[in-house]
Structures are given as structure tokens and as C-alpha cells.
Image (spheres, rainbow, N blue to C red):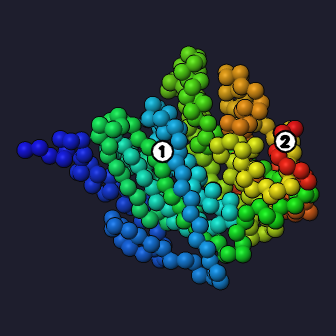
């Protein structure tokens, strides 16, 4: 008699994953969560105190960083990457993230791997005060290699209707504050993987279990949401940009209104060494590197110039380094100086 397991779908393994992740997932819950663990759906009440709340959503994944994690068996940072990509997009609209779901697609369920990934999602959600309401683990036999996987998620947040930040308040004379990124976060890894194929020395360093190359590349993303939420309660924020794929030149224009541009002074911070190493290996010019990677700035904040010092102080009190890296000008475009 043929079985579902014969076709490559192991329901017992899926149940084992559910048992392993239950404690971590439910630790992210609070009294506003509606529904039980393992149900068909779950919900969350809108926090009290909002007069005209708007619900905002974002969805994202970890990209091909997952492939490097597969190669090195380093899975416990990927959940932080996923949560950062989703909730830091939300907070860029002035939104408080309140809930999230995740989706893990695999060729074959490895109980240890899937459990590690989902528990890391839950850990990041717990730190950010976001309820992980549920998720899905989907086995794709014959479609994906047995040890292949992909990771994606969606996040939900709430904001007052008149407090949505869309960049329309940005004015010439505002300053651009950059919040440091100690690593690549979850962007540019297709470029990294290309270099691993082209450079034997880089590939050897990456494969060396006693080296730090793999650990540096797979270091988890920091969460900017706590610092930005603190900022929103303190200063007059005119614009916010999550610096992901496309870097500063690709993401700042998404928030700049017509007639406003900026010059970014790249001497105001020092990119982490890995960015320099990737540039040296690839021969890519400065413009290409800034379009591919965050280059050490993972989030940008636009505030009035007379509130710049206070804003930097709030960010640093929240545990992130920050500095004024540019000014808003009465012209279009982003220029790197």
C-alpha cells in the first residue's frame, strides 16, 4: 500500500516540529492574541489607545542567505533576518508591529533544522514585542532538493491614520541620520555567492570551520524597530527608510518627495571590513557596492536639523550607533559624496 511518506511527505516529522516549537511560539503571545496554538487561524486585538487605527502589512524573506546557511549548517540567525526584514519595513511607515506569521518551504523536513529556524523567528519576535501567531511548514518533494529550504513571512502593524510616515513631511534643511548596520543583514547574497564561485581563496575561508568568514556573513540582522519606535515618541520624524536591497541610492528615493534630494557624506561612517573585502574581491566600483549592499547603514531617519542631536541620542540609548550622514536639499536624487 502506497503512503504519503512514500511520496516524500512525512506527517510525523511535521508533527514533531510543531511539538518542538510550541513553547517558543507561545512565549511571544499576550492577552491580545485570539485563537489557540495549532488552529486554522489566529488573530490579535488592536492595542488600546488608538483613535483611528490603520492596519499595515509587509511581507519579505531572507533571500539566498538561506543557501549559505544550508551550506554551513548555521540556521539560528535566519529567524532574526526574517523578522528584521518584515517588521523594519513596517516601522518605516511609522507603524508599530504587533504580529507576524512565517512560512518555511523544504524539500524534506529535517526536524532539527526547521525547529531551529522557527525558534529563532520566535526569539526575534519576543525581543521586538511581536506575537508570532502561526505559520506553515511545507514539504516539496521532487520540487526542491531534500536539504533545500526557503523562508518567508508577513507582519502586521498598527498606526494612527494621521501618523503614517510617507515622506511628505520631508523638507529641504532636514538632516539624514544613518543607523549603523554591523553586517550585510539579508541583502546582496547572490553577489556573495557569485564571488564564492569565482574566488577559491574566498571559498576556502568560507568553508573553514575555524575561520570567521562564514560567521561574519551569516551574522543575524539587528532589529531597528525598538529604536525607531522610541524615536517616534520623542522627536518630529519626517521620513524613514529601511536600507535593504538597492542600498542607500535605491531606498532613500522611496521616501523622498518631489523636489527633494540628498547628498550622503560617506566619510561620516566606516563600513564594516566585510564590505571592503567584497569590493576588493569583485573589483566592483563604489557606486555598484552602494547599490548592492547597505555598506554599514541599515536604516535612515529624516528629522528637522534642530532635533538631530536629540534623535541620535535616542537611537544610541536604544542600543544602536547613529550619526548625521546627510542633508535634504531642494533638488532631486541621491548623491554620494
SS at circle 1 = loop
Q: Is residue 265 left or right of residue 247?
A: right
| Crowd around label 2: few <14 · some 14–19 · many ≥20 (10 Å) | few
Nearer to us in this view, 241 or 132? 241
Can residue 21 be seen by looking at this rendering? yes
Can residue 129 be seen by looking at this rendering? no
Q: Quadrant of residue 5?
A: top left
Image marks 2 and 1: residues in contact by CB distance under 8 Å? no
Counting residues from the start of the chain, the first of labels 2 and 1 encountered is 1
SS at circle 2 = strand
Q: How many marks?
A: 2
Q: Which residue is mark 2?
A: 335
Nearer to us in this view, 203 or 19? 203
Q: Which residue is mark 1?
A: 76
User: Where does the C terminus fall, quadrant-wise?
Assistant: top right
User: Where does the N terminus fall, quadrant-wise?
Assistant: top left
Q: Quadrant of residue 91?
A: bottom right
Residue lying at 70% horizontally and 69% vertically, measured from the top left = 164
Image location of residue 312, percent across then percent down: 81, 57
Residue lying at 57% horizontally and 59% vertically, measured from the top left = 58
Image location of residue 226, percent across then percent down: 66, 61
Image location of residue 327, percent across then percent down: 88, 51
Q: Residue furthest top?
A: 200
| Crowd around label 1: few <14 · some 14–19 · many ≥20 (10 Å) | many
Image location of residue 243, percent across then percent down: 69, 48
Q: Residue furthest left?
A: 1
Give above or below for 169 relative to 299: below
Give above or below for 1 relative to 231: above
Q: Which of pointers 2 and 1 indicates the residue nearer the eye?
A: 2
Residue lying at 92% horizontally and 63% vertically, measured from the top left = 306
Q: Is residue 111 left or right of residue 207?
A: left
Residue lying at 79% horizontally and 64% vertically, measured from the top left = 168
Amino acid at each position: 500500500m502506497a503512503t504519503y511518506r512514500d511520496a516524500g511527505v512525512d506527517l510525523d516529522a511535521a508533527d514533531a516540529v510543531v511539538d518542538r516549537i510550541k513553547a517558543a511560539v507561545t512565549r511571544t503571545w499576550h492577552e491580545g492574541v485570539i485563537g489557540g496554538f495549532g488552529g486554522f487561524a489566529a488573530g490579535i486585538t488592536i492595542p488600546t489607545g488608538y483613535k483611528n487605527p490603520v492596519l499595515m502589512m509587509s511581507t519579505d524573506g531572507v533571500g539566498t542567505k538561506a543557501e549559505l546557511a544550508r551550506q554551513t549548517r548555521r540556521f539560528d540567525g535566519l529567524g532574526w533576518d526574517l523578522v528584521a526584514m518584515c517588521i523594519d519595513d513596517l516601522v518605516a511607515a511609522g507603524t508599530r508591529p504587533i504580529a507576524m506569521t512565517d512560512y518555511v518551504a523544504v524539500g524534506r523536513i529535517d526536524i532539527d533544522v526547521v525547529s531551529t529556524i522557527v525558534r529563532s523567528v520566535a526569539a526575534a519576535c519576543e525581543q521586538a514585542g511581536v506575537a508570532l501567531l502561526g505559520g506553515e511548514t511545507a514539504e516539496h518533494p521532487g520540487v526542491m532538493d531534500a536539504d533545500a529550504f526557503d523562508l518567508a513571512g508577513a507582519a502586521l502593524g498598527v498606526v494612527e491614520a494621521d501618523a503614517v510616515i510617507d515622506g511628505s513631511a520631508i523638507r529641504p534643511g532636514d538632516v539624514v541620520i544613518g543607523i549603523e548596520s554591523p553586517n550585510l543583514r539579508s541583502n546582496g547574497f547572490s553577489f556573495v555567492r557569485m564571488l564564492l564561485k569565482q574566488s577559491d581563496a574566498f571559498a576556502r575561508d568560507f568553508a573553514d570551520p575555524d575561520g570567521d568568514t562564514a560567521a561574519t556573513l551569516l551574522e543575524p540582522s539587528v532589529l531597528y524597530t525598538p529604536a525607531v519606535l522610541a524615536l517616534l515618541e520623542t522627536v518630529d520624524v519626517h521620513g524613514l527608510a529601511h536600507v535593504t536591497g538597492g542600498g542607500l541610492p535605491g531606498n532613500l528615493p522611496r521616501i523622498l518627495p518631489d523636489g527633494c534630494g540628498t547628498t550622503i557624506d560617506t566619510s561620516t561612517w566606516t563600513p564594516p571590513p566585510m564590505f571592503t573585502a567584497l569590493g576588493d574581491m569583485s573589483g566592483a566600483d563604489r557606486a555598484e557596492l552602494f547599490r548592492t549592499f547597505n555598506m554599514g547603514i541599515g536604516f535612515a531617519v529624516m528629522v528637522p536639523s534642530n532635533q538631530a542631536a536629540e534623535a541620535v541620542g535616542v537611537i544610541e540609548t536604544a542600543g544602536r550607533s547613529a550619526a548625521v550622514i546627510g542633508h535634504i536639499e531642494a533638488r532631486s536624487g541621491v548623491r554620494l559624496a
